């Protein structure tokens, strides 16, 4: 089964699960439209459900395609570059191109840049934070589903390495968010008030990061 949108066909995958009470429609990262339902749901019912929610499914497709576009290629501090491979050692930039050797360890380079920048931004926000908190221990690692994690007990803040690819404003938001968890461990009204006090326009960055 396929769904056609903007002159392109998208595969529809039906997943029938034992004990599944409701039917859910999602568009996954591979752009397959996945319908999760129970064993007793007929194909006619599934087809009707898809067409009833066609416009919403198309919006989900657009959203996933935007995320794919925003993650393809070489990004550094919010800017996308065309990669040019050469025999040179190291890495160098022009306005819209990055030059590197085929054997260049880009992950190692990203980590080096992140360690310096993330530490600087954490120190800046700590010095300007409106609540007194212990100085956090910074950790950096790749994460697939979170931009940051705060361990309230050990005062560790872990930041996603992928933030080095984005504009510094998004890094600042995540740092303020995680530092606020050292005061409030939940996402209560008090928590968001503290985030807003330290970053008045945080809602803008929070919303935009959904497209990454």
Image (cartoon, rainbow, N blue to C red):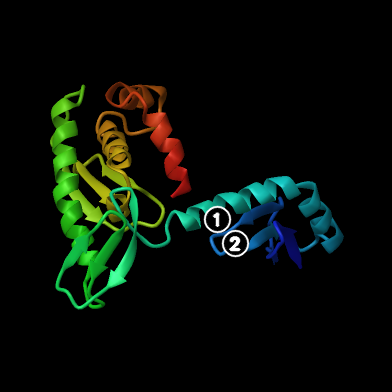
Quarter of the image for residue 105 reads bottom left
What residue do we see at 20% from left, 53% from top?
114
Which residue is more in the foreground, 45 or 53? 53
- Disc number at residue 65? 1
- Asked if 109 appears above or below 60 in the picture, the reply is below
Q: Is residue 38 visible?
A: no
Q: Secondary structure at mark 1?
A: helix
- Asked if 178 appears above or below 22 in the picture, the reply is above
- Compared across the picture, whether 125 is left or right of 4 comes to left
- Residue 145 rendering spot, x and y as whole percentages: 41, 53
Near mark 1 (Cα within 10 A), the count class, few <14, some 14-19 or many ≥20, is some
Which residue is more in the foreground, 13 or 71? 71
Q: Please state which of the two labelled residues, at mark 1 or mark 2, is closer to the viewer.
A: 1
- Residue 42 rendering spot, x and y as whole percentages: 84, 61
Quarter of the image where the N terminus is located: bottom right
What residue do we see at 74% from left, 61% from top?
3
The reply to whether discs 1 and 2 touch (Cβ–Cβ < 8 Å) is yes
What residue do we see at 39% from left, 62% from top?
73
Q: Is residue 68 visible?
A: yes
Mark 2 lies on residue: 31
Q: Secondary structure at mark 2?
A: loop
What residue do we see at 79% from left, 57% from top?
46
């Amino acid at each position: 089964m396929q769904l056609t949108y903007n002159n392109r066909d998208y595969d529809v995958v039906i997943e029938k699960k034992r004990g599944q009470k409701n039917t859910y429609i999602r568009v996954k990262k591979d752009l397959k439209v996945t319908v999760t339902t129970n064993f007793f749901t007929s194909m006619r019912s599934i087809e009707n459900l898809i067409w009833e929610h066609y416009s919403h499914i198309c919006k989900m497709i657009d959203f996933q395609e935007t995320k794919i576009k925003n993650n393809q290629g070489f990004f550094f501090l919010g800017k996308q570059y065309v990669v040019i491979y050469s025999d040179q050692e190291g890495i160098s930039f022009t306005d819209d191109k990055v030059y590197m050797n085929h054997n260049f360890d880009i992950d190692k380079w990203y980590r080096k840049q992140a360690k310096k920048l993330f530490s600087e931004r954490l120190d800046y926000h700590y010095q300007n934070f409106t609540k007194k908190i212990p100085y956090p221990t910074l950790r950096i690692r790749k994460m697939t589903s979170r931009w940051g994690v705060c361990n309230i007990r050990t005062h560790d803040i872990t930041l996603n390495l992928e933030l080095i690819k984005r504009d510094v404003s998004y890094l600042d938001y995540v740092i303020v968010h995680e530092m606020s968890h050292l005061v409030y461990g939940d996402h209560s009204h008090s928590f968001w008030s503290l985030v807003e006090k330290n970053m008045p326009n945080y809602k803008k960055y929070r919303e935009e990061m959904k497209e990454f």
